[in-house]
Amino acid sequence: MNIQLLVLDMAGTTIDEDNVVYKTLTKAVNDYGYEVTLDKVLEICAGMEKAEAIKNLLENIGGNTADTEAIFENFSDELGLAYDDLDVKPIAGVEEFLLKVKSKGKKVVLNTGYTHKIASQLLTKLNWKINVHYDALITADDVLESRPNPEMIFLAMKKFGITDSKTVLKAGDSTIDIHEGKNAGCGITIAVLSGAQTRAQLESALPDHILNNLSEAEHLLF
């Protein structure tokens, strides 16, 4: 299968930010008077656009979804502060993987349930450059429907004139990522164990491959 485009999730898939997003989200929800664990947040929220993730979480725990907007605003403020101090680094082997993929003429799109502001903050900390490490960034701000809707993948394909989704590889660390890839009809879906969810959770989405981390995907491409 000739993969032309790789659509890669960010936190937990290409970037190691120590689950700070989900830790901050947990704190924001609990600061509003709820009691949820990080494990619960990872199970329910991983990979989602974050306002929608908070709403889903509140529904799941019997909370008041009217609290979503206030919690999201608190979360966004807290996350900005957390990122100022955070040591962000690539998942082991991934930076070399991206450079090799790009050297072979394949396109790399980073996609995320984060806002454009947060995603850009991460990339600046990593010193990853467009056209060097990746070809485009697509965030929740760029689409009307968030994951698992495949709109972000279709936008990535459109950017590079790719019409056959079978030539697209989608990789992520959550079931939402895998459902997104399958909904787009991607030729390969890869779940990685370097991020938010467990092997058992990821298996439920039936990815084509489960890898320890993204750099292991090299043997599927070359």
Image (cartoon, rainbow, N blue to C red):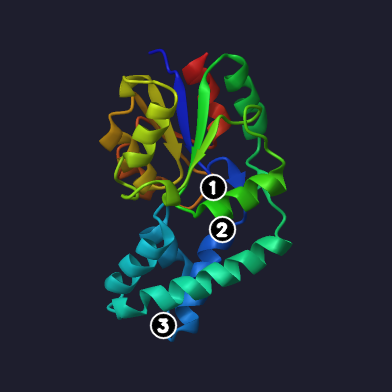
Q: What's the residue type where badge 2 is placed? A: Asn
| Position above or below: 3 against 150 | above
In the rendered structure, are the residues bearing label 1 and label 2 in contact, judged by CB atoms less than 8 Å apart?
Answer: yes
- In the picture, the quarter occupied by the N terminus is top left
* Residue 194 x/y as whole percent: 54, 44
| Amino acid type at image mark 3 | Tyr
Per the image, the residue denoted by label 2 is: 19
Q: Secondary structure at mark 3?
A: loop
The residue depicted at 39 percent of the width and 60 percent of the height is: 45
Residue at the farthest bottom position? 33
Residue under label 1: 12
* SS for dot 2: loop
Mark with earlier residue (3, 1)? 1
In percent of width and height, residue 178 lies at 35, 40
What label sits on residue 213 in the rendered view?
A: none
Q: Residues within 10 Å of mark 2 (few under 14, many from 20)?
A: some
Q: Counting residues from the N terminus, which is met first, the one under dot 1 or under dot 2? A: 1
Neighbor class of circle 3 (other Cα within 10 Å; few <14, some 14-19, many 20+) is some
Residue ID for mark 3:
34
> Pointers 3 and 1 in contact (CB under 8 A)?
no
Left or right side of 210 for 212 = right
CA–CA distance between discs 1 and 2? 8 Å
At 61% across and 26% down in the image, what residue appears? 97
Q: Residue at x 37, y 74 (%)?
A: 68
Q: CA distance from mark 3 to mark 1?
A: 26 Å
